Amino acid sequence: MQRTPANKIKPMKLGDLMVREGLLTPDALQKALTMQKQTGMISDLGQPGHYKPLGLICVEMKLITKQDLQRFLSRHHKRIQIGELMINMGLINQEQLNHVLEQQRFSSNRFGTLLVQSGIISEQQLTNALSMQLDIPRILPSPELIDPELLKGIDEQFLRQHECLPVHRYGNQMVVVMSDPLNSELLQTLLDRFQCKITPAIAPASEILNTLTYLFKPRRKTKNAPEPPNELDEKLLKLSSHAKPTKEQASPIAHFLIRSAVEAGATALHLESLEKYVRLRFRIDGALKHRTDLPVRLGPPLIDCIKTPFRIKREDYWQEKITTTIGRQQVELKISFFSGMWGENLVLHITYIPPRLMGIEDMGFSPQNQHKIENLLNRAGGILLAACPHRSGKSTLLYAAIAHLNHPNTSILTLEDAVDYAIPGVVQNHYGAGGKDSYSALIEAMNDYDSDVVMVAELKDQGVSERIDQAALNGKKVLAALNACDTTAALHRLQNLQATHFLTTPVPLLLVSQRLVRKLCEQCKTNFVPNPEELKVLHISATERKNFLFWQAQGCEDCNDEGYKGMSAIHEVLELNESLRQALRRGLTASGLRELARNGQRLITLAEDGVYKVIQGITSLEEVMRVTVPHEGDSLGGRSLKEIVAACEGRSLTGI
Ligand SMILES: [Zn+2]
């Protein structure tokens, strides 16, 4: 194959290359460069300006689209110097680049190493940014993911010196994980050495060096006896011994992936088939975190390996569960799939046994909302309706209410789609457990039973809502859930379900909407003054922003550079009172209803509760923006920060 030697590729200035590619005209480049110079000098607030990367300026000036820029960077990364690329990604500024280049004159260290050593950027940030911008797989150089055959005959010193490690080989193609995949000289050296096509992947230098130390260390006998195989292990192992070579390779990897997900405390493992690789991500603390990429060929056998123990039919995969022990942790596993353009995608859902049941006081309610909830739970009867979309901790919220009500002298019955947690002292049932009774008939039976509290996982239709209203009228406390994006939307949804008896019944009804947010890491969170635009997006007045301490994520060793550790939630809690009932009967619009709830009921919106928690240092504005879509009606009369803090703390709202 004719190939230009990699080391002959001459690096070019990004702007010149964009012109040469026809992405920009020379005129447009000039305009962008002038703009870059201006923004670098002085900002709109009269403070020293920030250096803006040329690519970003071109996007902001609408000279190119963001996708164009990404495609361009991905296509030409071999021609762009790492320093210039870092500047264009906004990770370093020109001054820092000059400083590191100066250091490089007297050092044999790589550019990336010097950048990290100078404390300008962390290794993880460097790796993640390069992987994302250049579409280079980020492979975890874990010994379990490396094909040991590839290391035979290779000198450790060679790999150490070049901070690289071969991972997989298929025919004439070898995936090599390296700390600097932009180093064209190294790519050429590897090509000469291995005599095959090199597909670069990226990982931090320290991870590669640690793995090399482990792989080349003389093996000693391990003191710890291996753990006995469990049900899942046995099925995976059985599969490997009869399978084709690729499956043999995939089986221990599948095993390793599941084990690492459990060790990391993940609630789901995602395997996504992409064009160039398979991406593995874990859902930890509610957010998806990239774990590693894998060669595309490993995708189908890996997915097969994970699916096989379930022995399922596609239509009822959700019913199939495996309870097993991984490490010392007992877990329940379920799977779901989705076919995409590049192949099958799989999610392995992990539930830990025993679960950690949270109390109402652990749910992160602001003082006023907590007061409203406890008020309803501590009185006789009433309905608590969790009005949240999927995956916003609806079950955790209902279980927390059950934990609050669960006493030896209280009888509690539940009807759930799937029993997530078995709670001692509570009679739990799940719909579809094999019985022939309809959902409504089961609720009817719960009503007839001499219970004090009933929990119904989903208000599915008019029949269900009528029955739970009847239960509440009979003096039972009812806990239920409804899919809705906020509390006022839930009221409209009740109307759509023809559950109009809620509009006339005297039963107290409290609607709670919730979103899960990541908690800021206590070790590294920092103060900042938000940009007025950020608050405006959340319909919050920015006038007093300088009078409050806002917190944001930073990243440290303690939080694995994430800036976050643990989970909390933001809420919107609305009690349905007579004026809202009347408004609903009159058929008030969504915005009108929202306005009435905010002004008449002092409703604190999800976004406002979120901002209160940013000021409290619990979460960040990015998290609040990630999980909320502010209601259009909230744009009318945005509250000041002072009013929000007072409302969340239940103090008098002077000035509203
Ligand atoms: Zn931290």
Image (cartoon, rainbow, N blue to C red):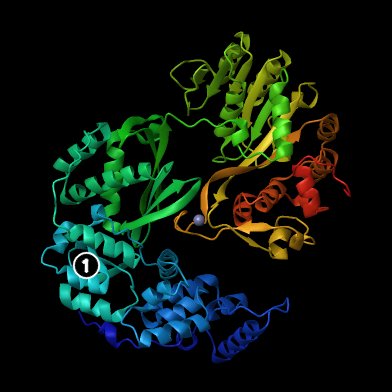
Q: What element does badge 1 sit on?
A: strand
Q: Is residue 328 visible?
A: yes
Check disc 1: other Cα within 10 Å, few if <14, some if 14-19, many if 20+.
Answer: some
Q: Is residue 39 above or below residue 543?
A: below
Q: Position of residue 241 (x, y in %)?
A: 14, 41
Residue 389 lies in what quarter of the image?
A: top right
Label 1 near ligand 1 (CB < 8 Å): no
Q: Is residue 196 visible?
A: no
| Residue located farthest toward the right when viewing the structure as drawn | 655
Which of the two residues, 656 or 23, is positioned nearer the viewer here? 656
Q: Position of residue 600 (x, y in %)?
A: 85, 39
Q: Position of residue 583 (x, y in %)?
A: 84, 35
Residue at horizontal 37 percent and vertical 74 percent from the top = 113
Residue at horizontal 62 percent and vertical 21 percent from the top = 405
Three-letter residue code for mark 1: Gln
Which of the two residues, 223 or 4, is positioned nearer the viewer here? 223
Q: Is residue 314 above or below residue 550?
A: above
Q: Position of residue 601 (x, y in %)?
A: 82, 38
| Residue located farthest toward the left when viewing the structure as drawn | 153
Residue at horizontal 80 percent and vertical 62 percent from the top = 543
Give the position of the N terminus as an image quadrant: bottom left
Residue named by callout 1: 173
Residue at horizontal 21 percent and vertical 75 percent from the top = 190
